[in-house]
Image: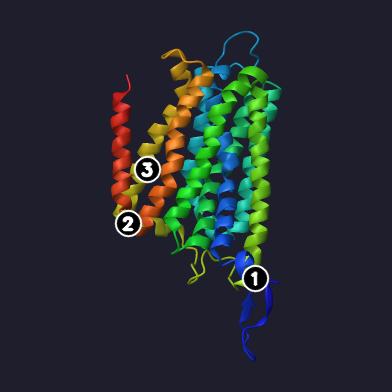
Amino acid sequence: MEVVGSSEPGQGSPKVAKGFTNPASDAHRYTILFLICMVTFGSYFSYDVPGATVTQLLDARPENKLHMTALEYNLMYSLYAWPNVIIVFVGGYFIDLLGIAFSGVALMSLVTIGQLIMTAGAFVHSIQLLFLGRLIFASGAELLIVCQGSMIFKWFVGKEMALAFGFSLTLARLGSILCFAFLPSVAENHGIPAAFGLGSIFCVISFVVLGIYLVLDSRADRILQRNPVQDSYEEPIQPQGLQEAFKLSPSFWLCVSTLMTNYGCLYSFFAISIDFMHHVLGLPSQDGGYELTLVYNISMVLAPMIGGILDIHGGRGLVTFFGAATSAILFCSLR
Protein backbone atom coordinates (compact mmCIF):
# COMPACT_ATOMS: atom_id res chain seq x y z
CA MET A 1 0.00 0.00 0.00
CA GLU A 2 1.26 3.47 -0.82
CA VAL A 3 -1.11 5.72 1.09
CA VAL A 4 -3.23 3.87 3.58
CA GLY A 5 -5.11 6.64 5.27
CA SER A 6 -4.48 9.22 7.98
CA SER A 7 -1.83 9.12 10.63
CA GLU A 8 -4.37 10.22 13.26
CA PRO A 9 -8.14 10.57 13.31
CA GLY A 10 -9.10 13.88 11.84
CA GLN A 11 -5.64 14.46 10.38
CA GLY A 12 -5.12 14.79 6.63
CA SER A 13 -1.47 13.75 6.49
CA PRO A 14 -0.99 10.41 4.72
CA LYS A 15 0.61 7.35 6.28
CA VAL A 16 3.49 6.32 4.04
CA ALA A 17 4.45 2.70 3.38
CA LYS A 18 7.45 1.47 5.37
CA GLY A 19 10.59 -0.35 4.32
CA PHE A 20 11.91 -0.52 0.78
CA THR A 21 8.61 0.66 -0.72
CA ASN A 22 8.89 3.94 1.23
CA PRO A 23 10.46 6.50 -1.15
CA ALA A 24 12.10 8.23 1.81
CA SER A 25 13.99 5.10 2.91
CA ASP A 26 17.70 4.75 2.18
CA ALA A 27 17.19 1.44 0.36
CA HIS A 28 14.68 3.03 -2.00
CA ARG A 29 16.79 6.14 -2.56
CA TYR A 30 19.88 4.14 -3.45
CA THR A 31 17.88 1.97 -5.82
CA ILE A 32 16.76 5.20 -7.46
CA LEU A 33 20.40 6.32 -7.56
CA PHE A 34 21.37 3.17 -9.47
CA LEU A 35 18.63 3.87 -12.02
CA ILE A 36 19.74 7.51 -12.34
CA CYS A 37 23.33 6.40 -12.93
CA MET A 38 22.24 3.96 -15.64
CA VAL A 39 20.37 6.71 -17.51
CA THR A 40 23.66 8.02 -18.95
CA PHE A 41 25.41 4.64 -19.21
CA GLY A 42 24.43 4.24 -22.85
CA SER A 43 25.51 7.73 -23.85
CA TYR A 44 28.91 7.40 -22.15
CA PHE A 45 29.46 4.04 -23.82
CA SER A 46 28.42 5.35 -27.23
CA TYR A 47 30.46 8.56 -26.95
CA ASP A 48 33.65 6.51 -26.83
CA VAL A 49 32.79 4.15 -29.73
CA PRO A 50 34.79 6.22 -32.28
CA GLY A 51 37.77 6.34 -29.92
CA ALA A 52 37.64 2.58 -29.30
CA THR A 53 37.47 1.84 -33.04
CA VAL A 54 39.90 4.53 -34.22
CA THR A 55 42.42 2.03 -35.61
CA GLN A 56 39.75 0.42 -37.78
CA LEU A 57 38.21 3.75 -38.82
CA LEU A 58 41.58 5.08 -39.99
CA ASP A 59 42.56 1.83 -41.69
CA ALA A 60 43.35 2.75 -45.30
CA ARG A 61 43.27 -0.78 -46.70
CA PRO A 62 40.91 -1.19 -49.70
CA GLU A 63 38.71 -3.73 -47.87
CA ASN A 64 37.82 -1.09 -45.27
CA LYS A 65 34.82 0.55 -46.94
CA LEU A 66 34.39 3.08 -44.09
CA HIS A 67 37.90 4.50 -44.23
CA MET A 68 38.19 7.95 -42.64
CA THR A 69 40.91 10.51 -42.92
CA ALA A 70 42.37 11.89 -39.69
CA LEU A 71 40.50 15.15 -40.36
CA GLU A 72 37.16 13.35 -40.75
CA TYR A 73 37.76 11.32 -37.60
CA ASN A 74 38.56 14.38 -35.50
CA LEU A 75 35.57 16.16 -37.00
CA MET A 76 33.36 13.61 -35.25
CA TYR A 77 34.57 14.95 -31.92
CA SER A 78 34.27 18.55 -33.08
CA LEU A 79 30.67 17.89 -34.09
CA TYR A 80 30.08 16.69 -30.55
CA ALA A 81 31.90 19.52 -28.79
CA TRP A 82 30.99 22.71 -30.63
CA PRO A 83 27.16 22.48 -30.40
CA ASN A 84 27.43 21.90 -26.66
CA VAL A 85 29.22 25.20 -26.14
CA ILE A 86 25.80 26.81 -26.63
CA ILE A 87 23.31 23.98 -26.06
CA VAL A 88 24.38 23.17 -22.50
CA PHE A 89 24.36 26.82 -21.43
CA VAL A 90 20.87 27.47 -22.78
CA GLY A 91 19.50 23.97 -22.25
CA GLY A 92 20.03 23.98 -18.49
CA TYR A 93 17.52 26.81 -18.24
CA PHE A 94 14.91 24.85 -20.17
CA ILE A 95 15.46 21.74 -18.01
CA ASP A 96 14.57 23.88 -14.99
CA LEU A 97 11.60 25.31 -16.85
CA LEU A 98 10.15 22.14 -18.40
CA GLY A 99 11.00 19.68 -15.65
CA ILE A 100 13.01 16.49 -15.44
CA ALA A 101 10.45 14.11 -16.98
CA PHE A 102 9.84 15.95 -20.25
CA SER A 103 13.48 16.99 -20.61
CA GLY A 104 14.81 13.52 -19.85
CA VAL A 105 12.61 11.81 -22.45
CA ALA A 106 13.39 14.44 -25.10
CA LEU A 107 17.14 14.29 -24.52
CA MET A 108 17.27 10.51 -24.32
CA SER A 109 15.36 10.41 -27.61
CA LEU A 110 18.02 12.57 -29.27
CA VAL A 111 20.81 10.38 -27.90
CA THR A 112 19.18 7.13 -29.02
CA ILE A 113 18.12 8.40 -32.45
CA GLY A 114 21.57 9.88 -33.05
CA GLN A 115 23.31 6.62 -32.17
CA LEU A 116 20.91 4.61 -34.33
CA ILE A 117 21.67 6.89 -37.29
CA MET A 118 25.40 6.42 -36.70
CA THR A 119 24.89 2.66 -36.62
CA ALA A 120 22.99 2.86 -39.92
CA GLY A 121 25.83 4.96 -41.35
CA ALA A 122 28.35 2.30 -40.31
CA PHE A 123 26.29 -0.44 -41.98
CA VAL A 124 25.92 1.44 -45.28
CA HIS A 125 29.48 2.86 -45.11
CA SER A 126 28.26 6.48 -45.11
CA ILE A 127 30.49 9.00 -43.38
CA GLN A 128 27.79 11.66 -43.90
CA LEU A 129 25.30 9.61 -41.86
CA LEU A 130 27.93 9.18 -39.15
CA PHE A 131 28.34 12.95 -38.99
CA LEU A 132 24.58 13.55 -38.90
CA GLY A 133 24.07 10.96 -36.17
CA ARG A 134 26.95 12.34 -34.13
CA LEU A 135 25.47 15.84 -34.29
CA ILE A 136 22.02 14.64 -33.15
CA PHE A 137 23.65 12.49 -30.46
CA ALA A 138 25.63 15.49 -29.22
CA SER A 139 22.48 17.63 -29.02
CA GLY A 140 21.15 15.40 -26.26
CA ALA A 141 24.10 13.68 -24.58
CA GLU A 142 25.65 16.53 -22.58
CA LEU A 143 22.31 17.98 -21.57
CA LEU A 144 21.26 14.51 -20.45
CA ILE A 145 24.15 14.65 -17.96
CA VAL A 146 22.81 18.01 -16.72
CA CYS A 147 19.36 16.45 -16.39
CA GLN A 148 20.88 13.53 -14.50
CA GLY A 149 22.41 16.03 -12.08
CA SER A 150 18.94 17.47 -11.46
CA MET A 151 17.66 13.97 -10.71
CA ILE A 152 20.42 13.40 -8.17
CA PHE A 153 19.81 16.81 -6.59
CA LYS A 154 16.11 16.05 -6.26
CA TRP A 155 16.73 12.85 -4.32
CA PHE A 156 19.95 13.65 -2.44
CA VAL A 157 19.95 17.36 -1.69
CA GLY A 158 21.43 17.69 1.80
CA LYS A 159 21.91 13.89 1.94
CA GLU A 160 25.22 12.42 0.71
CA MET A 161 25.05 14.45 -2.49
CA ALA A 162 28.78 14.30 -3.29
CA LEU A 163 28.67 10.55 -2.70
CA ALA A 164 25.71 10.25 -5.07
CA PHE A 165 27.53 12.23 -7.76
CA GLY A 166 30.55 9.99 -7.19
CA PHE A 167 28.46 6.89 -7.83
CA SER A 168 27.04 8.45 -10.99
CA LEU A 169 30.59 9.02 -12.23
CA THR A 170 31.45 5.41 -11.36
CA LEU A 171 28.68 3.99 -13.55
CA ALA A 172 29.56 6.45 -16.32
CA ARG A 173 33.18 5.35 -16.24
CA LEU A 174 32.05 1.72 -16.31
CA GLY A 175 30.43 2.45 -19.67
CA SER A 176 33.71 3.88 -20.97
CA ILE A 177 35.67 0.94 -19.53
CA LEU A 178 33.49 -1.64 -21.26
CA CYS A 179 33.69 0.32 -24.49
CA PHE A 180 37.49 0.54 -24.60
CA ALA A 181 37.96 -2.97 -23.21
CA PHE A 182 35.78 -4.83 -25.71
CA LEU A 183 35.00 -2.72 -28.78
CA PRO A 184 38.49 -2.76 -30.32
CA SER A 185 38.21 -6.55 -30.43
CA VAL A 186 34.59 -6.41 -31.63
CA ALA A 187 35.50 -4.02 -34.45
CA GLU A 188 38.53 -6.11 -35.41
CA ASN A 189 36.68 -9.44 -35.46
CA HIS A 190 33.10 -8.48 -36.40
CA GLY A 191 33.44 -5.12 -38.11
CA ILE A 192 32.82 -1.48 -37.28
CA PRO A 193 28.99 -1.72 -37.67
CA ALA A 194 28.84 -4.28 -34.83
CA ALA A 195 30.69 -1.87 -32.53
CA PHE A 196 28.29 0.99 -33.28
CA GLY A 197 25.36 -1.41 -32.96
CA LEU A 198 26.36 -2.28 -29.39
CA GLY A 199 26.26 1.43 -28.59
CA SER A 200 22.70 1.58 -29.93
CA ILE A 201 21.67 -1.38 -27.76
CA PHE A 202 23.01 0.27 -24.61
CA CYS A 203 21.25 3.54 -25.49
CA VAL A 204 17.94 1.68 -25.79
CA ILE A 205 18.59 0.00 -22.42
CA SER A 206 19.26 3.40 -20.84
CA PHE A 207 15.99 4.68 -22.34
CA VAL A 208 14.10 1.80 -20.67
CA VAL A 209 15.84 2.55 -17.36
CA LEU A 210 14.80 6.20 -17.67
CA GLY A 211 11.18 5.08 -18.06
CA ILE A 212 11.42 2.96 -14.90
CA TYR A 213 12.94 5.89 -13.01
CA LEU A 214 10.18 8.27 -14.11
CA VAL A 215 7.48 5.84 -12.95
CA LEU A 216 9.09 5.50 -9.51
CA ASP A 217 9.77 9.23 -9.29
CA SER A 218 6.13 10.02 -10.09
CA ARG A 219 5.05 7.55 -7.41
CA ALA A 220 7.34 9.25 -4.89
CA ASP A 221 5.94 12.68 -5.81
CA ARG A 222 2.46 11.36 -5.06
CA ILE A 223 3.32 9.60 -1.79
CA LEU A 224 5.58 12.34 -0.39
CA GLN A 225 3.33 15.09 -1.76
CA ARG A 226 6.18 16.70 -3.69
CA ASN A 227 5.71 19.14 -6.52
CA PRO A 228 6.97 17.15 -9.54
CA VAL A 229 8.20 20.32 -11.28
CA GLN A 230 10.50 21.23 -8.40
CA ASP A 231 13.96 19.80 -7.90
CA SER A 232 13.99 19.02 -4.18
CA TYR A 233 11.96 18.20 -1.10
CA GLU A 234 12.75 21.60 0.33
CA GLU A 235 11.69 25.09 -0.64
CA PRO A 236 10.58 25.49 -4.28
CA ILE A 237 13.25 26.59 -6.73
CA GLN A 238 12.02 28.92 -9.43
CA PRO A 239 13.75 28.84 -12.85
CA GLN A 240 15.96 31.89 -13.26
CA GLY A 241 16.50 33.97 -16.37
CA LEU A 242 19.63 33.45 -18.44
CA GLN A 243 20.93 36.80 -17.25
CA GLU A 244 21.38 35.27 -13.79
CA ALA A 245 24.36 33.30 -15.13
CA PHE A 246 26.33 36.54 -15.35
CA LYS A 247 25.75 37.16 -11.64
CA LEU A 248 27.51 33.97 -10.52
CA SER A 249 30.55 34.40 -8.30
CA PRO A 250 34.13 34.57 -9.63
CA SER A 251 34.94 31.35 -7.76
CA PHE A 252 32.29 29.56 -9.81
CA TRP A 253 33.80 30.75 -13.09
CA LEU A 254 37.31 29.79 -11.91
CA CYS A 255 36.03 26.29 -11.12
CA VAL A 256 34.34 26.05 -14.53
CA SER A 257 37.53 27.22 -16.26
CA THR A 258 39.60 24.63 -14.41
CA LEU A 259 37.26 21.81 -15.38
CA MET A 260 36.99 23.04 -18.97
CA THR A 261 40.75 23.09 -19.59
CA ASN A 262 41.27 19.81 -17.75
CA TYR A 263 38.53 17.95 -19.60
CA GLY A 264 39.56 19.50 -22.90
CA CYS A 265 43.06 18.07 -22.60
CA LEU A 266 41.97 14.69 -21.26
CA TYR A 267 39.24 13.89 -23.75
CA SER A 268 41.22 15.18 -26.71
CA PHE A 269 43.97 12.75 -25.78
CA PHE A 270 41.54 9.89 -25.12
CA ALA A 271 40.11 10.35 -28.62
CA ILE A 272 43.46 9.50 -30.24
CA SER A 273 45.11 7.48 -27.47
CA ILE A 274 44.51 3.99 -28.94
CA ASP A 275 45.85 5.06 -32.33
CA PHE A 276 48.74 6.83 -30.56
CA MET A 277 49.68 3.70 -28.63
CA HIS A 278 49.28 1.58 -31.76
CA HIS A 279 51.62 3.64 -33.96
CA VAL A 280 54.01 5.14 -31.40
CA LEU A 281 54.28 2.32 -28.86
CA GLY A 282 53.46 -0.56 -31.18
CA LEU A 283 50.55 -1.87 -29.09
CA PRO A 284 47.69 -3.73 -30.81
CA SER A 285 44.40 -1.81 -30.65
CA GLN A 286 42.95 -4.33 -28.18
CA ASP A 287 45.89 -3.85 -25.78
CA GLY A 288 45.68 -0.08 -26.19
CA GLY A 289 42.03 -0.22 -25.18
CA TYR A 290 42.88 -2.17 -22.04
CA GLU A 291 45.62 0.32 -21.15
CA LEU A 292 43.19 3.21 -21.49
CA THR A 293 40.68 1.54 -19.17
CA LEU A 294 43.19 1.92 -16.31
CA VAL A 295 42.33 5.62 -16.14
CA TYR A 296 38.63 4.87 -15.91
CA ASN A 297 39.13 2.00 -13.44
CA ILE A 298 40.91 4.29 -11.00
CA SER A 299 38.28 6.99 -11.46
CA MET A 300 35.46 4.47 -10.98
CA VAL A 301 36.85 3.32 -7.63
CA LEU A 302 38.00 6.66 -6.23
CA ALA A 303 35.03 8.85 -7.25
CA PRO A 304 32.47 7.55 -4.72
CA MET A 305 35.14 7.22 -2.00
CA ILE A 306 36.32 10.80 -2.39
CA GLY A 307 32.71 11.96 -2.74
CA GLY A 308 31.85 10.42 0.63
CA ILE A 309 34.88 12.07 2.25
CA LEU A 310 33.94 15.46 0.77
CA ASP A 311 30.41 15.13 2.15
CA ILE A 312 31.88 14.79 5.64
CA HIS A 313 34.99 16.96 5.61
CA GLY A 314 34.61 19.34 2.65
CA GLY A 315 37.62 20.49 0.62
CA ARG A 316 36.14 20.35 -2.89
CA GLY A 317 38.30 23.23 -4.14
CA LEU A 318 41.50 21.61 -2.89
CA VAL A 319 40.64 18.28 -4.52
CA THR A 320 39.84 20.04 -7.82
CA PHE A 321 43.20 21.83 -7.73
CA PHE A 322 45.06 18.61 -6.93
CA GLY A 323 43.36 16.76 -9.80
CA ALA A 324 44.14 19.50 -12.32
CA ALA A 325 47.75 19.81 -11.14
CA THR A 326 48.28 16.03 -11.36
CA SER A 327 46.87 15.96 -14.89
CA ALA A 328 49.20 18.79 -15.94
CA ILE A 329 52.27 16.98 -14.58
CA LEU A 330 51.33 13.71 -16.30
CA PHE A 331 50.76 15.42 -19.66
CA CYS A 332 54.16 17.10 -19.40
CA SER A 333 55.70 13.66 -18.92
CA LEU A 334 54.43 12.39 -22.28
CA ARG A 335 57.13 12.20 -24.92
Q: Quadrant of the C terminus?
A: top left
The mark nearer the N terminus, 3 or 1, is 1
- Residue 78, given in percent of the width and then of the height, sits at 49, 31
Q: Look at the numbered disc 1 and give the secondary structure of its residue.
A: helix
Q: Look at the numbered disc 3 and give the secondary structure of its residue.
A: helix
Q: Does the residue at mark 3 contact the one at mark 1 (Cβ under 8 Å)?
A: no
Front-most of residues 254 and 155: 155
Choose mark 1 or mark 2, whichever is in front: 2
Choose mark 3 or mark 2, whichever is in front: 2
Residue 112's tag is none
Residue designated by label 1: 222
Residue type at mark 3?
Leu
Q: CA separation, marks 3 and 2?
A: 18 Å
Q: Which residue occupies the extreme top position in the image?
A: 62
- Residue 232, given in percent of the width and then of the height, sits at 51, 66
Above or below 272: residue 205? below
Quadrant of the rendered structure where residue 139 is? top right
Residue designated by label 2: 314
Q: Quadrant of the N terminus?
A: bottom right
Above or below 194: residue 314? below
Residue designated by label 3: 259
Q: Residue at x 56, y 33 (%)?
A: 178
Q: Residue at x 68, y 48 (%)?
A: 208
